[in-house]
Image (tube, rainbow, N blue to C red):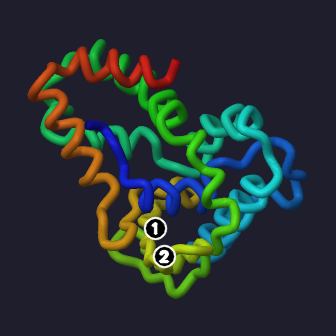
Amino acid sequence: MLRISKLALGAMLSAGIAAPALVTPASAAVSQSNPSAFVETLASDGLAVLRSGSEAQRRGQFRSLLGQHFAVEAIGDQLLGRWRNQITPAQYSAYRRALPGFILGTYADRLSSYSRANVEVINARQQGSSYLVQTRITNPGSRPVSAIWYLTRSGSRYQVYNMRVANINLTLNQRQDFDAYIQRRGFDQLVAFMESRGA
């Protein structure tokens, strides 16, 4: 089964990858001044939207927010793992086209239970060319969880390329699912499945 756990999903999505146009330009600006400010403002804006936006509005901007604040191409390559060098250019192009829609169709409508969550930045550090920002995510009725955001810097902008939530590596978790699916059904069937979820 292709999935990210509900806990990990809620931490990732409610912390800021669904910010539609109803947020004013001033409040929607995600800070690029430093890694902590980037995660803090991304989370704040995303949570504000979850408390006020409709499903249609969230879905309408989700794809653009993925492209803006998440390193989607790098994430996609990580999810492919060993298969990246075993597929044709045409297969790779089809996969890249299907990935944002797959994420949108699979996860974007499951956010309402995280509308009251709070994301607190605990610390940030640089590790090689990456930046790791540790946060504590608290959702009423649930135990607080730790989430580490893995950031890369592209030009003057930070982008998220992985998260570790409650000690679960989201990229590794999803890559294992993709790998198992490809072994059972083949790569083209994975892409077809992704396209069906994004339709």
| Residue found farthest to the left | 183
| Residue found farthest to the bottom | 122
Residue at 42% x, 78% y is: 126
Instruction: Measuring from the top left, give residue 74's x and y in whole percent.
Output: 37, 44
Q: Quadrant of residue 91?
A: top left
Answer with left or right where residue 176 lies relative to residue 125: left
Residue at 46% x, 63% y is: 151
Q: Quadrant of residue 46?
A: bottom right
**Distance CA(mark 1)–CA(mark 2):** 5 Å
Q: Nearer the viewer, residue 197 or 156?
A: 197
* Residue bearing mark 2: 133
Residue at 40% x, 26% y is: 96
Answer with left or right where residue 156 lies relative to residue 73: right
Query: Residue flagged by tag 1: what amino acid is it?
Result: Trp
Residue at 64% x, 44% y is: 65
152 w.r.t. 188: above or below: below
Q: Nearer the viewer, residue 80 or 111?
A: 111
Instruction: Measuring from the top left, give residue 116's x and y in whole percent.
Output: 69, 67
- SS at mark 1? strand
- SS at mark 2? strand
Query: Residue flagged by tag 2: what amino acid is it?
Result: Val
Sequence-earlier tag: 1 or 2: 2
Judge the density around disc 2: few (<14), some (14-19), many (≥20) Cα neighbours within 10 Å: many
Q: Quadrant of residue 156?
A: bottom right
| CB atoms of marks 1 and 2 within 8 Å | yes
191 w.r.t. 122: above or below: above
* Residue bearing mark 1: 149
Q: Count the numbered circles shown.
A: 2
Residue 75 at least partly seen: yes
Give me the disc on residue 174: none
Instruction: Measuring from the top left, give residue 50's x and y in whole percent.
Output: 72, 54
Judge the density around disc 1: few (<14), some (14-19), many (≥20) Cα neighbours within 10 Å: many
